[in-house]
Image: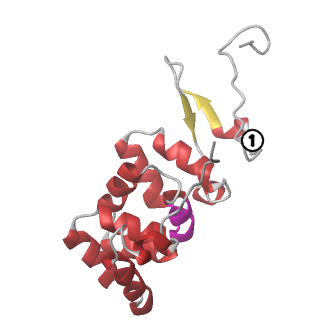
């Protein structure tokens, strides 16, 4: 990496697959370290592609993840949550209030929401379902009763195919 002006810390250009660029006005070098601090408003975070936001959240410590996730509106949080590793999804949903968790789960696709709720302790999942709109909660309960082996369970799971040799 080169240095600008020949002195000072090296600069790093952050590019994401969706061609988003984070402006240098939101990046600061933390004194005495090589770590960068990102100061981006909640509104600007909501403009990032969900996969990019998920990558950022996954790279943070648990406390930082929770703080960023809590600051997101329900729609942005749901879109990012669908892109996050299931173990981290579970941890994030367990750190927020039932009301906020219900709002986020309502915004998720039914299959992703059902997968997340299935990973949670039954009591927490039921609390989240009780906080949701009745129709959406009933749809998710129906998805949750289907096991992976039944047609209903298989219909809600993404599938992949590989060519036969």
Number of numbered labels in the structure image: 1
Is 20 placed left or right of 52 in the picture?
right
> Is 93 in the magenta?
no
**The C terminus sits in image quarter:** top right
Give the residue at mark 1.
Answer: 21
Point out the stretch of residues depicted in magenta: 72-79
Expressed as whole percent of the image width and height from the top left, the position of residue 74 reads 50, 70
Q: Nearer the viewer, residue 120 or 35?
A: 120
Which residue is the extreme one toward the right? 5
Which color scheme is applied? secondary structure
Residue 76 versus residue 68 in the image, above or below: below
Residue 76 versus residue 53 in the image, above or below: below
Which residue is the extreme one toward the front? 165
Is 29 placed left or right of 128 in the picture?
right
Disc 1 is placed on an element classified as loop
Q: Nearer the viewer, residue 147 or 132?
A: 147
Expressed as whole percent of the image width and height from the top left, the position of residue 30 reads 52, 26
Residue 31 versus residue 38 in the image, above or below: above
Is 32 placed left or right of 8 in the picture?
left
Q: Nearer the viewer, residue 149 or 23?
A: 149
Which residue is the extreme one toward the bottom? 135
Mark 1 Cα shell of 10 Å, populated few (<14), some (14-19), many (≥20): few
Query: Residue at point 37% right, 74% down?
Result: 150
Expressed as whole percent of the image width and height from the top left, the position of residue 113 reads 43, 70
Quarter holding residue 39: top right
Quarter holding residue 23: top right
Query: Residue at point 65% right, 47% down?
Result: 163
**The N terminus sits in image quarter:** top right
Expressed as whole percent of the image width and height from the top left, the position of residue 90 reads 34, 57
Is 84 placed left or right of 39 in the picture?
left
């Amino acid at each position: 990496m080169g240095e600008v002006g020949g002195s000072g810390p090296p600069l790093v250009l952050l590019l994401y697959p969706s061609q988003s660029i984070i402006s240098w006005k939101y990046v600061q070098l933390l004194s005495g370290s090589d770590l960068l601090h990102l100061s981006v408003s909640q509104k600007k975070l909501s403009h990032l592609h969900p996969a990019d936001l998920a990558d950022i959240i996954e790279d943070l410590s648990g406390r930082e993840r929770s703080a960023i996730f809590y600051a997101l509106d329900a729609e942005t949080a749901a879109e990012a949550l669908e892109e996050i590793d299931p173990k981290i999804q579970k941890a994030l949903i367990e750190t927020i209030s039932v009301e906020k968790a219900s709002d986020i789960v309502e915004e998720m696709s039914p299959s992703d929401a059902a997968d997340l709720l299935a990973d949670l302790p039954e009591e927490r999942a039921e609390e989240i379902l009780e906080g949701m709109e009745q129709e959406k909660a009933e749809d998710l309960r129906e998805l949750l009763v289907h096991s992976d082996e039944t047609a209903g369970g298989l219909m809600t799971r993404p599938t992949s195919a590989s060519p036969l040799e």
